[in-house]
Amino acid sequence: MNMNTNPNAPHWRKLYLSRAKLKASSNTSALLSGFAMVALVEIGIESDVPQGLVVAFSVCTTLLVSVHLLALMASTCILPHIEAVSNVHNVNSVKESPHEKMQSFIQMSWAFSTGLGIMLFLAELVLICWVKFNTKAVGYNVAAAWASTGIVIPVGIVFLVFAFHFYKKLIAHKFDNHERNLAALDRMAEEIDMNHSILDV
């Protein structure tokens, strides 16, 4: 299939992008939710850990797993239908794919997995360190907990800055593509008008 001349080329590009996003969301969510579940089950919480810290750890872990499971569910439900269409060697089969109508769910899965889910994962790391180090068993090693917090906070800021700039660049790229497509359509319209003028003469 020639992606430059085929009228369905933009739809195919969107289909391949949707498929890639769903695959990435599925893999990331499965990995991070699995880690959170293992942490919840295996971590030994001492009796002298402050109750507020335990509640925060429980809430964060539950949110983390829930967000990633939602992303995983969306990916698992939508991806097979997109894969089935992408494996059909027919240019017009892209119209049978649900990726256009399901775009909101695909974007939700992508945002939950790579955005909100990763921020919750960073918060989970901080809470695990506080739960493990702020206990009598390790001499209330608050310095270690603060050290991990001091590392995660800049990482979280860098992540947010990267996400903002990435989204900004992506929007600019899409805008440039639309401008090029409109310019190409204008040229085609001018050529058609010229051909009609020649035929009328």
Image: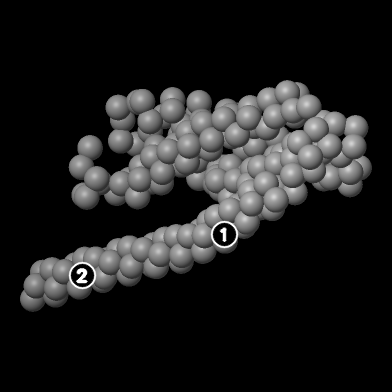
Question: Circle 2: is it few (<14), some (14-19), or many (20+) Cα within 10 Å?
Answer: few
Q: Nearer the viewer, residue 110 or 32?
A: 32
Q: Which residue is mark 1?
A: 154
Across and down, in percent, residue 176 comes to: 33, 67
Across and down, in percent, residue 31 comes to: 57, 30
Across and down, in percent, residue 170 comes to: 42, 61
Question: Circle 1: is it few (<14), some (14-19), or many (20+) Cα within 10 Å?
Answer: few
Q: Are marks 2 and 1 in contact (CB under 8 Å)?
A: no
The chosen color scheme is one colour
Q: Residue at x 73, y 23 (%)?
A: 42
Q: Which residue is mark 2?
A: 187
Q: Quadrant of residue 154?
A: bottom right
Mark 2 or mark 1: whose residue is earlier in sequence:
1
Q: Residue at x 33, y 63 (%)?
A: 177
Q: Quadrant of residue 131?
A: top right
Residue 120 visible here: no
| 147 is higher (above) or lower (below) than 196 | above
Q: Which mark is residue 96?
A: none
